[in-house]
Image (spheres, rainbow, N blue to C red):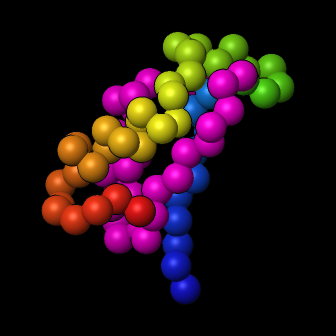
Amino acid sequence: MDVRVFTEPQQGATYEDLVRVARCAEDAGYDAFFRSDHLLAMGDSSGLPGPTDAWVTLGALPGRRRRSGSAR
């Protein structure tokens, strides 16, 4: 069974928060890291500090990974 991590950063997360979560997922042996492409917060969340762009974030993460290889 593959186990993956999915994040909703529009609810309030910085790029550095996403890097930390992606690294933790990688270190823990999860099979993949995904993030939402929503720009607006849902529910009562302020969404601050504001959304990061999904494609830019996912494109930048492989350069911040600890291991070599392509990102999933």
Name which residue lies at 52% across and 14% down: 49
Percent x, y for residue 10?
A: 62, 27
Left or right of 11 on screen, residue 50: left
Name which residue lies at 42% across and 33% down: 56
Name which residue lies at 52% across and 79% down: 2
Q: How many marks?
A: 0
Left or right of 40 on screen, residue 58: left
Q: Does residue 30 lie above or below 56 as drawn?
A: below
Is residue 35 in view?
Answer: yes
Single out the residue that lies furthest toward the bottom: 1
39 or 18: nearer the viewer: 39
Q: Which residues are magenta?
A: 11-40
The question of residue 19 being in magenta is answered with yes
Percent x, y for residue 4?
A: 52, 65
36 or 30: nearer the viewer: 36
Left or right of 47 on screen, residue 58: left
The question of residue 14 being in magenta is answered with yes
Is residue 18 in view?
Answer: no
5 or 53: nearer the viewer: 53
Quarter occupied by residue 15: top left
Give the quadrant of the C terminus.
bottom left
Name which residue lies at 42% across and 68% down: 30
Q: Does residue 29 lie above or below 24 as drawn?
A: below
Single out the residue that lies furthest toward the right: 43
Q: Does residue 16 lie above or below 18 as drawn?
A: above
Left or right of 50 on screen, residue 56: left
Q: Does residue 51 lie above or below 9 as drawn?
A: above
Give the quadrant of the N terminus.
bottom right
Percent x, y for residue 45?
A: 73, 21
